[in-house]
Each structure stands twice: as structure tokens, then as C-alpha cells.
Image (tube, rainbow, N blue to C red):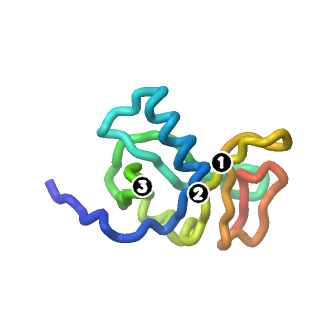
Amino acid sequence: MRTENITTPAPVTLTAGALAELKKLIDQQEIGPDFGLRVGVEGGGCSGMSYILGFDQKKEGDSEYEIDGIRVFMNKAHGMYLAGMEVDFKNGLDARGFTFNNPNASSTCGCGSSFSA
């Protein structure tokens, strides 16, 4: 089995708020060591593409990164849409949940989870 070197910097960043929430979820849901955070995109949403963020196992065609002790998986083909993106977690009165700040998005929708490139 071929293993990739995971010392390459991740094309996405996770803010301190996102890291804290993800680590809390990993502990609460007892996410096993074979799983990591999948960051990606899929067709759909009100602006054409939607973000994928969830725990998953590594799949063929994935790149693997490590961000502050969290394994991060990303389909290599999604890199052009996600390079430079910041994932944050908001926990305020006006909004609660993960947010995406993507410099590659030419437009985004009001929900913040859909974009076009």
C-alpha cells in the first residue's frame, strides 16, 4: 500500500474556532483514527456548487493533510475550487455553524454554503 507524505501544507485553513468545534465533535461522536475531516465540493446549491464538510474515511484519489492534529481528506480534483479557503465556526446570536470564506468563489448565496467559481 502506497502512503503519501502528509507534510505538504493543506490548501485550506481552519480557524481556532473551527478547530475547537471539530475536536469537540471528534470527542463527542467518538470518531475513530481511520476517519478524518472531508473538505470538498459537489454540484448543486443555489449558486451552482455546495461545500462538503464531514467525517469520512480516505478514498482513492484523495490527498491527505494534517491540520493541528486533525486528518483532512480532499479529493485532488477539488483543490482548484478550495485553494486558500478558510473554514470558521460561528457561535453567535446571528449565526451558528461552520462558515466558508473562499477567495475562488466568483459569487456566493445568502446561505453561505453555496458558491460559483
Look at mark 1 in the image and give the residue it sits on.
Answer: 89
Where on the picture, by quarter, is residue 66? bottom left
Q: Secondary structure at mark 3?
A: loop
Q: CA distance from mark 2 to mark 3?
A: 10 Å
Q: Amino acid at mark 3?
A: Asp
Per the rendering, the mark at residue 68 is 3
Look at mark 2 in the image and give the residue it sits on.
Answer: 15
Q: Earlier in the sequence, mark 1 or mark 3?
A: 3
Q: Nearer the viewer, residue 64 or 2?
A: 64
Crowding around mark 2 (Cα neighbors within 10 Å: few <14, some 14 to 19, many 20+) is few
Q: Amino acid at mark 1?
A: Phe
Residue 74 picture location, percent across and down: 44, 57
Mark 2 and mark 1 in contact (Cβ < 8 Å)?
yes
Q: Amino acid at mark 2?
A: Thr
Q: Earlier in the sequence, mark 1 or mark 2?
A: 2
On screen, 2 above or below 70?
below
Q: Nearer the viewer, residue 67 or 16?
A: 16
Crowding around mark 1 (Cα neighbors within 10 Å: few <14, some 14 to 19, many 20+) is many
Residue 105 picture location, percent across and down: 70, 69
